[in-house]
Amino acid sequence: MAILERWEPVIGLEVHAQLATNTKMFCRCKREYGASPNVHTCPVCLGYPGALPVLNQQAVEFAMIMGLAVDCTVRGLSRFARKNYFYPDLPKGYQISQYDEPICEHGKLTFLLDDGASKTVGITRIHMEEDAGKNIHGDGNESYVDYNRCGTPLIEIVSEPDIRSPEEAHKYLERLKQTLEYTGVSDADMEKGNLRCDANISIRPRGAAKLGTRTEMKNLNSFRGVERGLMYEIRRQIKLLENGAEVEQCTLSWDDHAGETRLMRSKEEAHDYRYFPEPDLVPLIIPDSQVQAIEAALPELPSAIEERFSKQYGLNPDDIRILTRTRELAGYCEQVIGAGANPADAAQWLQGEVMRVLNEERENITEFTMEPEQLAGLIDLVATGSINRNTAKTVFDRMLEEGLSALEIVTRDDLGQVSDAESIEQAVRMVLENNPVELERYLRGESKLFGFFMGRVMAGTRGKGDPQTVKSALQRILAEMHPGA
Amino acid sequence: MNKSIDERLRGFPAALAEQNELNAVIADISDQAIARVNGQKGPLADYLLAIKDNLNLVETETTCASRILKDYRSLYTATAVQRLLDAGAHVAAKTNLDEFAMGSSTEHSCEGPARNPHNPELVPGGSSGGSAVVVATGLVDAALGSDTGGSVRQPAAFCGLYGLKPTYGRVSRYGLVAFASSFDQIGVFAGTTELAARVFESIAGHDSLDSTTSDQPVGTFAYEEEQARRITIGLPEEYDNEGVDREIRERRDDLVTRLKNDGFTVKGISLPHTDYGIAAYYILTTAEASSNLARFDGVRYGYRSPDGQNLEAMYTNTRSSGFGPEVQRRIMLGTYVLSAGYMDKYYIRAMRVRRLIRDDFLQAFKEVDLILTPTTPSFPFPIGGKVDDPLTMYLSDVFTVPMSLAGVPSMNIPVGHGSNQLPIGLQLTANYFNEETIFQLSRFIEQQYTF
């Protein structure tokens, strides 16, 4: 975009992630997606008169894990606050959130861009809050509310305005999602609304230090939506500025289907949330020892695994990006390598046959039935020349169907590669004898017929011939017949 | 089953009818109490109790004396009420109150005002007026109220009862419909120190459903005269002014003289930030109330206005006709003090005052064990006398509000009557979690002196 040579977008993201706790944030109701409306409710999450919140300790732990995973400082004392507004999906008339004393602050997240450059975005804060219910609008005038989601624990991860393009925003979000999944604190499934993204966007002339007037954009709830929505708003703001107009502070909502934004509220209509400390909860005190214990127990994070895949296994950046997308896939890959497979071969198999099957079956690596050791066994048979690559694909499919090891199938089905020179030479001579016309043409200079003979010989060995051995035998015998060819 | 309890429960509707004009009860639930009778044991098994109608008891309506809770039935039972039942108590009535416990006279009730049994033309005090009345008339032996800024102590003073507001965090608020969460405490009305202590001990203690409850152990009160005599008493100079009715001051002075003669140490002390109490109290409690009462929106339960073209109109009409004028006044005040641009000026400064007042008490309790003050500056006032003058009404809480800001325990003790035959109450305030000290001196005065 040429206009971006003159203008610089400045973007900060606010990402809400539902925590994968067993129960809700302030009551014991089960946290479950997709249940019948209002089955997971109680006086507390329905905001009945007199009911009081009790903080879910697992949610606190998950918030700390995520905070530490993105290099935040965990506050020894944090506080809950009430954010007041009226809406039917908010039964108490306020949301319990955190305001000026959030649980985590001052973190950062580093990720790679497509050109291989590394980018670091500051994390201003991570605070805890409860999710609202869902309004459901009926066919007629009626509206209904489902409070199952109400009270689901959320963390809101607020970035510094360090993001400079929709691509960076996309990569940041991807890294955040990956980190949430690696640490297990969220299912981070955007389709299920586990992960929701709002953005603050402003534009300034390149080189300027002062920030422009920003707009807030809500409902960027897919990776595609984030890029498209941001690009739409960047274009809109630049157009205003280029025409000498001003950007007005407002809140917009992205409509991914229509591919445009609509105005939710202007600056004048901005809510006054009247935050004040939540008197029903005591300050959250977190001793250093607990922070240290959680830090010590943190799982290996994406950046560390990526580094290991590069240094220890010598894998290339593209392979690494794909293989470390989820902790489970990276873990499977490591188990295959650990069972003796060459890292490059393991990477190739995973991105090839394994992913093909997973895509076909719409499965996750955790549902994949082949043990890493079995796959390593198959890779080993190829590496030692016992079977060739094509045969290996057949063996792979049969392994999945029957649950047997590669060796068992190769032995049973007699799929071992034929590589002894004598039988291959015999096969070559037989093919040449049986195809005198083609041989004649070849010897007169039609060298492309070499492929024809290769194919016939391979077919003659029912695919078991080692291609290298076949090729050199064919070359040698043809050369003997016609030294100049 | 205790025979007299059985008789009293069966005779309850008739007994209640006899005091109909006092309008103290919103719901007679003696039939439920009878159904629940099952050879109860426990410290309260011989007693009939009433609870303020802002406490949830499953399968009863909880109205908070508000139109907006029309037809709302409790889905669950408040912890304090459950503990009463577990202690064997027979809960026979839900009592009248100022709507959502906002008021000092029990006039702001959608059920109409409750009346003082000593003179039905006068208010019984509030907001727990109904609970005070039913104990004063002997209809029940004890009752629960809630005290946010004096709502147990002041009606106890106006009706001649013992009325305790425990330390903030002593009694679970789970199931008490919130007015101002950081102030509200469930309190006890009783005719004797002993019974007030028994009821308090039954309901007090940590509750996993209320994060603000304390795990400080709850003792069992046993009166010991020698222990009582060692209590040092403080008289704050700020509570001694011309605004206090002469007879109330004289009664206090008379009590002080008797205590001194009996060898008690009585000292002058200072609670220097007392004057700021009322202002800070009305800023902080209305702020919390504006948020606590947001849930009454017509969406899920209670009253919903039939007029509403859209969501906004439904909210506005429901809340405008569902809440009475005093509640609306406080919601508006509270919304205002939390608004952008005013928060620092009001709410934050009031929080600072609250800390100073708490520090005043902590300082005072370095010198004395108990603080003795009047509970109210005046005698019960006529029904209708202050309704149109909210500020004067608010000032009637001047001596009870500081303890609520600090969260310290405080109890009204009855000390006879004035020349007008109306009760006089004095207030004993102790350091955090020292309810026991209050009971000791209260019992001493109850046993040794007649007024």
Image (spheres, helix red, strand yellow):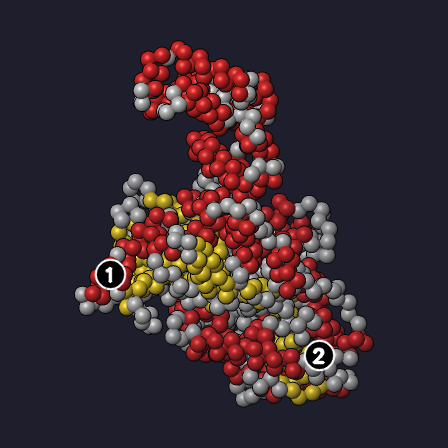
Q: Residue at x 43, y 31 (%)?
A: A360
Q: How many marks?
A: 2
Picture layout, residue B244 above or below residue B430 = below
Query: Of A21 and B282, which appears nearest the observer?
Result: A21
Outermost residue toward the right in this view: B226
Q: CA distance from mark 2 to mark 1?
A: 76 Å
- Mark carried by residue A125: none
Do marks 2 and 1 share a subunit?
no
Quick one: SS at disc 2?
A: loop
Quick one: SS at disc 1?
A: helix
Q: Quadrant of residue B330?
A: bottom left
Query: Of B4 and A61, which appears nearest the observer?
Result: A61
**Other residues around mark 2 within 10 Å, as few (<14) / some (14–19) / many (≥20):** some
Tell me the subunit letter for badge 1: A
Q: Residue at x 69, y 87 (%)?
A: B267
**Image x and y of residue A250, in percent:** 30, 63
**Image x and y of residue B364, in percent:** 66, 82
Q: Residue at x 53, y 61 (%)?
A: A71
The C terminus of chain B: image quadrant: bottom right
Closest to the camera, between mark 2 and mark 1, is 1
- Mark carried by residue B369: 2
Q: List the residue tagged with mark 1.
A: A3
Query: Of A90 and B247, which appears nearest the observer?
Result: A90
**Image x and y of residue B22, in percent:** 52, 63
Q: Is residue B430 left or right of residue A93?
A: right
Give the residue type that dot 2 points to. Answer: Asp
Give the residue type that dot 1 points to. Answer: Ile
The answer to whether any part of residue B249 appears in the image is no
Picture layout, residue A136 above or below residue B424 = above
**Image x and y of residue A100, in percent:** 48, 68
Outermost residue toward the left in this view: A243
